Image (tube, rainbow, N blue to C red):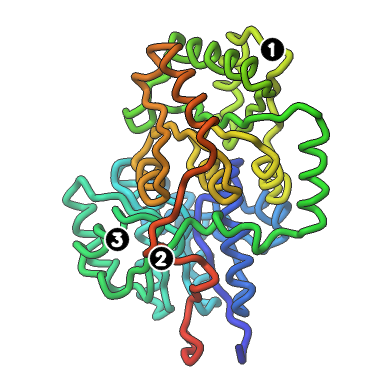
């Protein structure tokens, strides 16, 4: 690598989401190994710099979909454009950032950053992303217009490949496992081992439960009080019969949404309260990975809880609240899904969890999924600039 290159990385970072923080850590480490230094454009710039030691700037709408005063009258949009101009590469990722089922404002908020990179003549990429099948005319037009103009698109599921192909971007799309699946390649081994030993110091084995507070955000997974109560009783029974502790691990901790709130509701209904504990939120990658490394079993509503479970080959039951969880289950051949209607029966819920625990890890990746050791942003002969 002859020269150090600089990239701007745009994503939903710095707002207390563990999955996003793990992607940020892993993507920036992957880029650093290629001689690419990163400035992060995210929602919480101060938190990004504090937690990751990376230069960061706040994301802002360039097209003033929310506030023209904040974007242009205060000069923040112009400042963001100048940051793009000073860098060699533009990267959007990771996560499901480009989807129109969250409304046109959120769709444009991501799309405009890709447009800016293209207009400025920068090599522009999407990395470790999911791209939702567009439901709107503006979504279809936006994808057809922009995706074929990107240098490369690395997606994490087959649905996204199909969307890219339909948008005319078949030649520049690649499918890989979620980059967090390869997180052990980038962890500090000493810190990871220290956290792993701390996680397993108790003589009793444990399972992890990772729910999402807003489980029905896409209208697929309603968790009312009755279903949460039956889940609690099923966990009680599993804890007794398998001699497990139950550790609730939050992936989101912010004023807008906190997974601890739904965890506390489940814990309040449990009878085996002495076996249940709520772990504090932490964005530390070694600490998070260590929890999954030491677990005997994982119940995952959060996508990256499932990613970490499979990365460490742990038995896992998925709660498919979004299509990205369904896609992940399919391409990793994970058959244990806890559907919302299953939670209408305590016995069925327990049976689903117990069957998964007893079966052990049985997943396997699709053969066409690349791992990140096989991927780089540019070919060796291509300077990219």
Residue located beneath label 3 in the image: 161
Could you tell whether 203 is left or right of 30 in the image?
Answer: right
Query: In the image shown, does 204 or 65 lie closer to the viewer?
Result: 204
User: What label sits on residue 334 in the rendered view?
Assistant: none
Disc 3 crowd, CA 10 A, few/some/many (<14, 14-19, 20+): many
Residue name at image x 40 percent, y 77 percent: 120
Is residue 255 among the parts visible in the rendering?
yes
Distance (Cα) linking label 1 and label 2: 44 Å
- Where, by quadrant of the figure, is residue 276 drawn? top right
Q: Residue 154 carries which label?
A: 2
| Residues under numbered marks 1 and 2 in contact, where contact means CB atoms less than 8 Å apart | no
Residue 314: x percent and y percent? 58, 42
Q: Distance between the residues labelled 3 and 1?
A: 45 Å
The image quadrant of residue 263 is top right
Q: Is residue 234 rendered to the left or right of residue 106?
A: right
Element at badge 2? strand
Q: Which residue is drawn at 63% across and 32% down?
A: 249
The answer to whether residue 207 is left or right of residue 227 is right
Element type at mark 3: helix
Q: Where is residue 15 in the image (x, y as percent from the top left)?
A: 59, 43
Give the label on residue 273, or none. Answer: 1
Do the residues under discs 3 and 1 have CB atoms within 8 angstroms? no
Distance between the Cα atoms at labels 2 and 3? Answer: 9 Å
Above or below residue 271? Residue 10 is: below
Q: Comparing marks 1 and 2, which lies closer to the viewer?
A: 1
């Amino acid at each position: 690598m002859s020269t150090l290159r600089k990239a701007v990385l745009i994503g939903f970072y710095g707002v207390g989401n563990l999955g996003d923080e793990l992607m940020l850590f892993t993507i920036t480490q992957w880029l650093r190994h290629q001689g690419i230094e990163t400035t992060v454009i995210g929602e919480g710039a101060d938190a990004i710099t504090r937690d990751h030691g990376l230069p960061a700037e706040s994301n802002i709408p360039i097209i003033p979909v929310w506030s023209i005063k904040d974007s242009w009258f205060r000069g923040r949009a112009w400042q963001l454009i100048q940051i793009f101009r000073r860098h060699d590469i533009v990267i959007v990722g990771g996560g499901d950032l480009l989807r129109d089922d969250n409304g046109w404002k959120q769709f444009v908020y991501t799309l405009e950053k890709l447009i800016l990179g293209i207009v400025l003549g920068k090599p522009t990429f999407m990395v470790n992303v999911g791209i939702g099948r567009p439901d709107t005319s503006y979504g279809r037009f936006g994808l057809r217009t922009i995706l074929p103009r990107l240098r490369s698109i690395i997606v994490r599921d087959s649905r996204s490949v199909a969307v890219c192909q339909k948008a005319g971007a078949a030649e520049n799309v690649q499918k890989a496992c979620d980059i967090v699946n390869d997180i052990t390649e980038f962890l500090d081994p000493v810190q990871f081992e220290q956290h792993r030993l701390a996680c397993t110091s108790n003589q009793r084995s444990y399972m992890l439960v990772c729910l999402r507070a807003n489980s029905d955000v896409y209208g697929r997974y309603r968790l009312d009080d009755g279903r949460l109560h039956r889940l609690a009783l099923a966990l009680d029974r599993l804890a007794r019969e398998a001699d497990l502790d139950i550790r609730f691990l939050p992936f989101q901790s912010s004023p807008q949404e906190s997974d601890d709130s739904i965890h506390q509701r489940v814990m309040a209904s449990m009878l085996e309260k002495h076996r249940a504990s709520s772990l504090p939120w932490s964005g530390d990658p070694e600490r998070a990975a260590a929890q999954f490394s030491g677990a005997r079993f994982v119940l995952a509503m959060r996508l990256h809880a499932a990613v970490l479970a499979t990365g460490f080959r742990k038995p896992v039951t998925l709660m498919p609240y979004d299509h990205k969880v369904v896609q992940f289950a399919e391409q990793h051949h994970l058959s244990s899904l806890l559907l919302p209607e299953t939670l209408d029966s305590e016995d069925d819920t327990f049976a689903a969890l117990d069957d998964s625990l007893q079966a052990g890890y049985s997943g396997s990746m699709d053969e066409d999924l690349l791992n990140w050791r096989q991927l780089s942003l540019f070919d060796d002969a291509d300077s990219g600039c």
